[in-house]
Image (cartoon, rainbow, N blue to C red):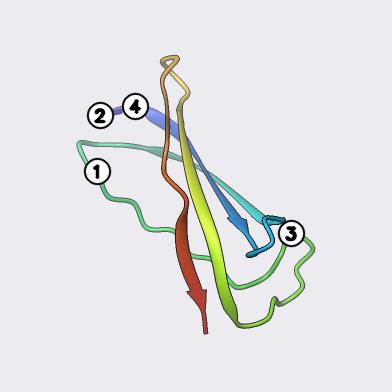
């Protein structure tokens, strides 16, 4: 996805598998393979979620080409 506009979607789930937050961002990439996302610890309704383990997955869609990438599920700890 070098030098393209991409849509980055981050999905955060609780440990029961329920989607609690979806974060969407559009960026123009340069040859970077690292991205940073910030989650404020709230769900999609703006309610602060309890401390604990959550799971996230990232999907990257090219807006100029029909390419998609998807990460594995990874753990995230909310303190």
Kindly report the distance in space between the C-alpha atoms of the residues bearing marks 1 and 2: 9 Å
- The residue indicated by pointer 2 is 2
Kindly report the distance in space between the C-alpha atoms of the residues bearing marks 4 and 1: 13 Å
Kindly report the distance in space between the C-alpha atoms of the residues bearing marks 3 and 1: 27 Å
Residue 71 or residue 28, whichever sits in front = 71
Q: Earlier in the sequence, mark 4 or mark 3?
A: 4
Circle nearer the viewer, 4 or 3: 3
Residues packed near mark 3 inside 10 Å, few (<14), some (14 to 19) or many (20 plus): few
Q: Are marks 4 and 2 in contact (CB under 8 Å)?
A: yes
Q: Secondary structure at mark 1?
A: loop
- The residue indicated by pointer 4 is 4
Where is residue 17, by image quadrant? bottom right
What residue is shown at x 59% (from left), y 57% (from top)? 12
- In x, y percent, where is residue 72? 42, 45
- In x, y percent, where is residue 10? 53, 49
Point out the image quarter for the N terminus. Answer: top left
Residues packed near mark 4 inside 10 Å, few (<14), some (14 to 19) or many (20 plus): some
- The residue indicated by pointer 1 is 33
Q: Earlier in the sequence, mark 1 or mark 2?
A: 2
Horizontally, is 44 left or right of 74 in the view?
right
Q: Is residue 75 above or below residue 57?
A: below
What residue is shown at x 34% (from left), y 27% (from top)? 4
Circle nearer the viewer, 1 or 2: 1
Q: Secondary structure at mark 4?
A: loop
Q: Secondary structure at mark 3?
A: loop
- The residue indicated by pointer 3 is 44
Q: Is residue 29 above or below residue 75?
A: above
Horizontally, is 74 left or right of 47 in the view?
left
Kindly report the distance in space between the C-alpha atoms of the residues bearing marks 4 and 2: 6 Å
- In x, y percent, where is residue 33? 24, 43
Kindly report the distance in space between the C-alpha atoms of the residues bearing marks 3 and 2: 30 Å
């Amino acid at each position: 996805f070098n030098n393209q506009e991409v849509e980055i979607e981050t999905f955060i789930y609780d440990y029961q598998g329920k989607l609690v937050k979806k974060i969407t961002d559009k960026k123009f990439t340069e040859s970077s393979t690292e991205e940073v996302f910030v989650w404020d610890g709230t769900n999609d309704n703006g309610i602060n979620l309890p401390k604990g383990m959550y799971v996230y997955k990232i999907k990257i869609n090219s807006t100029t080409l029909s390419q998609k990438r998807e990460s594995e599920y990874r753990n995230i700890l909310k303190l």
